[in-house]
Amino acid sequence: MTNLRDTMFEEINIENSKIVIIDDSKTTVQVIKDILINKMNFNFQVFEAFDGIEGLELIKKICPDAVLLDIDMPRMNGLELCKILRNDESTQLTPIVIITGSDTVENKIIALKSGANDFISKTRVQNLDIVDIQLKIESLLKIKRLTDNLEKAENIIKSLAKAVEYKDYYTKGHADRVSNFGEIIAKKMHLDQELINDITLSGLLHDIGKIGVPDNILNKPDKLSAVEFEIIKRHPLIGEEICLPIKSFEKVREIIRHHHEKLNGTGYPDGLKGTEISLGSRIIAVADIYDALTSRRSYRNQISHENSIKILKESALKNEIDKEVVDVFLGYFEKS
Ligand SMILES: [Fe+2]
């Protein structure tokens, strides 16, 4: 995998990228195809379609790295196709370049609103003014490659979080449930969508650092010794470090680090107090504690929903967890 921090943009490898050209003018398709294959030295795999419907089928089949798209076409025009691609999870990040006959500001705005990334003027294509086309394609393909790598890195981290559950049999499904409860609370508190997403993801990843805790400590049926507990207490820091390479995980990293903090300052690793602990961390803490209580663990049987609720309320009274978050969470059970 490309190291995202060490690779210079100009060095990103775009060899063998798959590009789809969709235009009802066979001449235009041929000219662009010639530029991509013969004037650029990247061994591009170029595919062609001559209307929107045919183009959509082709895109679904080959998952291209970029799409060059005419606007006026039979059956489905380019703008409609653009919107469909942007609303589909598998193609929403695929670069789309509109090949336009009239590159007026109005047309560009319409195309941008439909989800296009850039434009190529048909006049430039016909005049073989290729530098502009080459630069645009190269740049978009490099951004696509970076996005792909980022997605791979995210998926690896999520897989790692799943692997943690295999280390500790009793925590199977815990991450999914904490994520689900966290999302429910965040939605009920009407937080903005970005924070809801971060909280949901943090729930999934909050214990990822347990990958660095020996199995015999994680699965110990007896009370942990002071030394063993100190080792367990490192997992929020290890988790934060695992997620460090992903820049977009900034908030998620913070929640992972602080999901064991307590409002009265007796938590770990930083002993934060009250609102020094972010709302996201306070939400995940409540979701985490509830699910831990209601699940069977290596050292105890599961606790009933009613008794778990009692424990949550007591913990809120001791100012360990956020009372408002607990109330919102309890409201969810009352209505469901
Ligand atoms: Fe934890």
Image (spheres, rainbow, N blue to C red):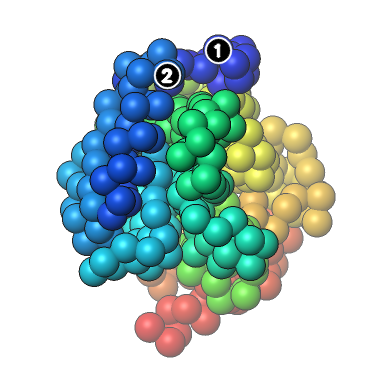
- The verdict on label 2 being within 8 Å of ligand 1 is no
Circle 2 residues within 10 Å: few <14, some 14–19, many ≥20: few
Q: Find residue 160 and report its image quarter.
A: top left
- Farthest front residue in view: 127
Q: Residue at x 38, y 35 (%)?
A: 32
Circle 1 residues within 10 Å: few <14, some 14–19, many ≥20: few
Residue 11's disc is: 1
Q: Residue at x 49, y 54 (%)?
A: 100
How far apart are the alpha carbons under marks 2 and 1? 19 Å
Mark 1: amino acid: Glu
Q: Secondary structure at mark 1?
A: helix
Q: Find residue 136 and report its image quarter.
A: top right
Residue 260 lies, in percent from the top left, at: 62, 43
Which of label 2 and label 1 is nearer to you? 2
Residue 39's disc is: 2
Mark 2: amino acid: Lys
Q: Is residue 193 visible?
A: no
